[in-house]
Amino acid sequence: MQHLIDADHHNILPSHGEALLFPDFFTTQESDSYFDHFKHDISWIQEPAVQFGKKKMEPRLTAFSGDENAEYHQGSLMLKARYWTVPLLNIKTKLEAKFETSFNECLLNYYRDGKDYMGWHRDNAHALGEYPVIVTVSFGATRIFQFRDYKEKVPVVSLELDHGSVLFIKGQTQEFWEQRLPKTSILVGPRINLIFRLMLKKGFSDHL
């Protein structure tokens, strides 16, 4: 059973967690400028990953920025943080002021078309703390994003992440829910996703 949510500052999740959508957090002009910067001025990479014993390329491009000595680990993949760019710092400052929290790292994902995706996962690395705050920013094509109950696998809660939108996730969400950005057969353009987190221990990161 799936529910497509048209949410605006209301909790998307029915229980055990909190996820708030801010559809127009950035203006169209800001969003266009940021998208152009991240598309052309970031050193994107595509790394191999091992799934079910087979090695294949990750179905998206990635980059990683953060404070000094920050590292991102996902399976065999390890990225050392690049310095914050001015646009990333501007976005980070605006998010920290809005949500009254701090972030020390940002994972960037570049979904080139509808074939690129992120599978089901939880952002529950120990170094994120018991109840991590995660903010995901979207620029570019609109894509469906989904949550589902981690144990029961239902319900599936779906929402659209538009150009310039921000999804704010906190509380028990990572304990009780998993999330993904699925493939789509619909013809869509590229999307760039920025995921801001506060890593409590330097040098430790996990799946996102």
Image (spheres, rainbow, N blue to C red):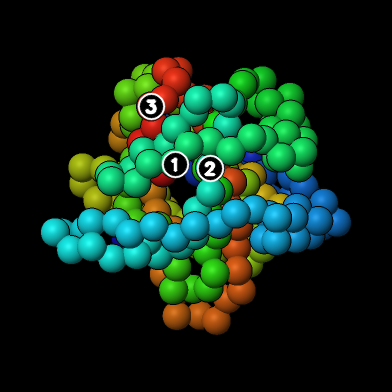
Q: Amino acid at mark 1?
A: Leu
* Residue 177 drawn above or below residue 32: above
Q: Which residue is mark 3?
A: 204
- Residue beneath the point at 70% across and 61% down: 40
The image position of residue 160, as x and y in percent, is 56, 59
Q: What kind of residue is marked 3?
A: Phe
Q: Earlier in the sequence, mark 1 or mark 3?
A: 1
First in sequence: mark 2 vs mark 3: 2
> Which residue, given by chain and number where applicable, does mark 2 sit on?
64
Residue 182 sits in quarter: bottom left
Residue 171 x %, y %? 44, 26
Residue name at image x 71 percent, y 40 percent: 85
Nearer mark to the viewer, of 1 and 3: 1
Q: Is residue 199 visible?
A: yes
Spot occupied by residue 47 in the image (x, y as percentages of width and height): 39, 57
As drawn, 118 above or below 101? below
Residues tagged 1 and 2 counted as in contact (Cβ below 8 A): yes
- Judging depth in this view, the residue of 14 and 51 nearest the camera is 51
Q: Using residue 178 as the reference point, say whether residue 71 is left or right of it.
A: right
Say whether marks 1 and 3 touch (CB < 8 Å): no
> Would residue 170 be seen by someone viewing this image from the given angle?
no
Res 119 → quadrant = bottom left
The amino acid type, in three-letter code, at marker 2 is Phe
Mark 1 vs mark 3, CA separation in Å = 11 Å
Q: Which residue is disc 1 drawn over?
A: 79
Q: Quadrant of the N terminus?
A: bottom left
Q: CA gap, disc 2 to disc 3? A: 13 Å
> Mark 1 packing: few (<14 Cα in 10 Å), some, or many (20+)?
some
